[in-house]
Image: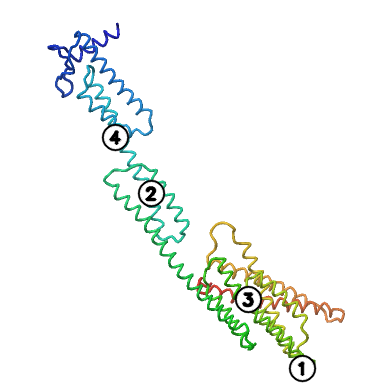
Amino acid sequence: MEQQEHLLNQARQFGYIQDDQVWLRPFMDLPARQVGQVKDTPEAALVYFAQRFEAFRAKVDDLLARITESENKGSFLMKALHLKEQIASFDGLGDFEELHRRLTQAEDDIRSLVSRNREKNLATKIKIIEDAEALHDTVDWQGGADQLKDLRQAWIKTGPVNKEVTDEIEQRFQAAVDHFFARRKAFQADKKAMTNRAFDKYKALIQRSEALQNSDDWEGTTQKLKQLQQEWKDVGGSLPRKQANELWTRFRAAHNRFFDRLKDHISSKRVEAKDTYMDDNLGRKRALVAEAEALLERPMNEAVSRAKELQAAWKKVGPVRGEESDRVWEAFLSACDRIFELSALEHYVRKRIPLEGPKPGPQEQLNLRLTALRDFIKFDRQEQAVLEENLGKLSDAPANEAFRNMLQSKIRTFERKIRTKNDLMELVRRRYAGTANIS
């Protein structure tokens, strides 16, 4: 009964009965309007429309509570506006003006929050655009693509901005993305064209080598094959590993075929006469020298293994006459020294290049090798100086002769090591010519 009395009092406060019609009193700038009619008693009609108001107010209370609890308050703006519009036409008796005020306050709060969020979203999207535009000149294609993928996800997750700038920032972001991928597409097209040109050059060198592999012009063909090996190195093309290995195997097979025939030819020409025997040995040793000198163009692990085989083969070749013996021996020793010193250098360099992270560029690769060679030479000279100092202090007594010879031999060894390392400095400079600024 108390609830009924409360509703009746509320209804009489905001409404009245006139000519069996239920009227809502004027509020705000709205005039009085009819909301229903009396079907039973005036009191029952007033209570009924007060109850309708209470049901409407419950909907408002529920919406405002959900807005308060929600993190995404902006999604409730249209619902608040819809209820606010209903106030002017809803049939009920109650304090509609108070509901209008509460809904208006909620609307203002939501609009203010949306405005702040859109300003924040705009700042976030501008930062995303700047990060995308920072890739304008990058050549790290994989890293750039990964970064743009992340930026796209961040863009999608960032809420809307004010409509007047939406198109502008969308176009600016898309332009940065399109610019990167257009550059990457052009680079890949150029790279493919360069790869095709390198492939054609390698194929041509293989064909020229295979045309010479059965030649009987031993000396002339040796020089031609060495020239082809230099041209192979000068191509400098970057092919897929499998394809590059297949081409190199064919190229190397043609050269091995000729040098194997050369060795067989020299062996078949042996005669008993001493002079002919000496000449034969000289030819075999020159062939070993030629092959040893050509090893610089082979993969390093293969070159080292082959150099050791050539050293073993050298020991099986008989003597050579006089000064020619010294010259061919020095040439062979120098060629083998270059292989072993270069192998030691590359091993040293590999140990100092991190397995992870970006690889050094051509200039860094060159500088690393030149610095290492300079350090090696410095160490060799220090060792040589110590030996020379010890030799100088040694007396002329016959008992010291064996020790003196040993010191002199070691000094000559260091002289050769230093000379070889100086030769390698020129070699690595030539290998990096055109891909790095020589220092």
Residue corresponding to mark 3? 253
Q: CA distance from mark 3 to mark 4?
A: 79 Å
The amino acid type, in three-letter code, at marker 2 is: Lys
User: Mark number for residue 111?
Assistant: 4
Left or right: 152 as drawn, with respect to 225: left
Depth check, mark 3 against mark 1: the one in front is 3
The number of discs equals 4
Residue 224: % across, % down:
59, 84
Depth check, mark 3 against mark 4: the one in front is 3
Residue corresponding to mark 2? 127
For mark 1, does the 10 Å Cα neighbourhood hold few (<14), some (14 to 19), or many (20 or more) residues?
few
User: Mark number for residue 388?
Assistant: none
Q: Quadrant of residue 370?
A: bottom right
Of callouts 2 and 3, which one flags the residue occurring earlier in the amino acid sequence?
A: 2
The amino acid type, in three-letter code, at marker 1 is: Asp
Q: Residue at x 17, y 14 (%)?
A: 37
Of callouts 1 and 2, which one flags the residue occurring earlier in the amino acid sequence?
A: 2
Q: Spot the residue most to the top.
A: 1
Of callouts 4 and 1, which one flags the residue occurring earlier in the amino acid sequence?
A: 4
Residue 179: % across, % down:
37, 59
Depth check, mark 4 against mark 1: the one in front is 1
Q: CA distance from mark 1 to mark 2?
A: 85 Å
Residue corresponding to mark 1? 275
Vertical position of residue 349 compared to residue 115: above or below: below
For mark 2, does the 10 Å Cα neighbourhood hold few (<14), some (14 to 19), or many (20 or more) residues?
few
Vertical position of residue 54 compared to residue 159: above or below: above
